[in-house]
Amino acid sequence: MDISFIVVNWNTKDYLSKCLKSIYDNIGNINAEIILVDNGSTDGSDKLAIEQFQSIKLINNKNNLGFAKATNIGIVESKGRYICIINSDVVVLEGCIRRLLKYMENNRNIGIIGPKVLNPDMTLQFTCKEFPNLWNTFCRAVALDKLFPKSKVFGSFFMTYFNYNYIKKVDVLTGCFWMVRKRSIVDVGLLDERFFIYAEDKDWCKRFKDKNWDVIYFPEAKIIHFGGSSSSKAPERFYIEMYKANIKYWQKHYSCISNIFYKLITYCHHLARIIIIILGYPYFKTNDNSIMKLKNNIALIKYMSSHIR
């Protein structure tokens, strides 16, 4: 088996069918299997997938086990030399799989590779990052990366200085689409299931780098990522989950002092955002996105105030 495709689904009926069709359209003569791991969906998306794609292997979880654990279930069941982990709200564009596979075959030290990721309007998504530290977290919090996007000093959090048209060894690839060498997973280990959702991508990439496996951004392959297919159903809950995941990452990889400063930067950042949105509200009354951001930030401040220590 060349590739095992693993798609984790939780109530993404509007996207899942397009995702699976795009995978099938790109397989060609590659010996592959598609494993759909459903996290207790209630919208019928898992049944629709089986009806449309009879050869798919469906694993039904009774509850939402989170992204990392569900993906691990798929990896354990997989038979491919390569594992392709794809979000259910992704559409794979022509030639993507073949080009990634060829590059992996020719470069044996690559553990993880990811394509250029595009928004639905075909603009670029920033999916490469440097590992987080107090400095780039601070620069992101006070928007120095937006003021000086071409600066490596201020823009390292999202690598805003990086030209996404070039193949590059990076620290972190956002986990909406990965092709991973199965042999490297045996060396590094599965995803850390303490991360329910979010931060598992930078944690896994760090562990790959620590084991001297390359993490490669490969723009000659392309996908479209719609984003927010699951989190949009409960934005405040998932916003807090993102913070909780980041805290777990910092606790795992950094000192106690660094954790304290990370929480302080995060708290001040979101408090400032609340103040800015409220002051600007008279000028953005019809901006639903601003209202959603305000609610998310208030929810996080409340959570941090009751749990921070």
Image (cartoon, grey):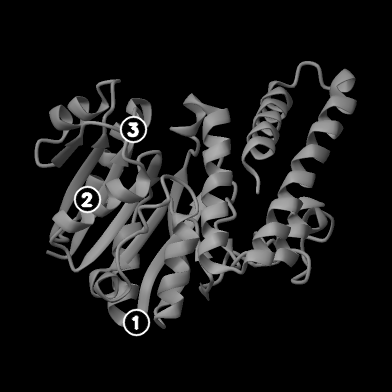
Q: Which type of secondary structure does the marked residue at label 3 adopt? A: loop
Which residue is painted at 71% across and 29% down in the image? 298
Q: Which type of secondary structure does the marked residue at label 1 adopt? A: loop
Q: Amino acid at mark 2?
A: Ile
Mark 1 = which residue? Answer: 107
In the picture, measured across the screen, residue 93 lies left or right of residue 1, that is right
Gap in Å between the C-alphas at discs 1 and 2? 27 Å
- Sequence order check, earlier mark of 3 and 1: 3
Of badges 3 and 1, the one in the foreground is: 3
Q: Position of residue 41 (x, y in %)?
A: 28, 27
Mark 2 = which residue? Answer: 73
Out of 151 and 120, give the one closest to the viewer: 151
Q: Residue furthest front?
A: 309
**Location of residue 240 (image quadrant):** top right
Gap in Å between the C-alphas at discs 2 and 3? 15 Å
The answer to whether residue 59 shows anywhere in this view is yes
Determine which of the numbered discs, if any, sits on residue 253 in the image. none
Q: Is residue 81 above or below residue 200?
A: below
Out of 172 and 270, give the one closest to the viewer: 270
Of badges 2 and 3, the one in the foreground is: 2
Which residue is painted at 36% across and 29% down in the image? 12
Q: Position of residue 59 (x, y in %)?
A: 16, 40
The answer to whether residue 159 shows anywhere in this view is no
Determine which of the numbered discs, if any, sits on residue 10 in the image. 3
Q: Amino acid at mark 3?
A: Trp
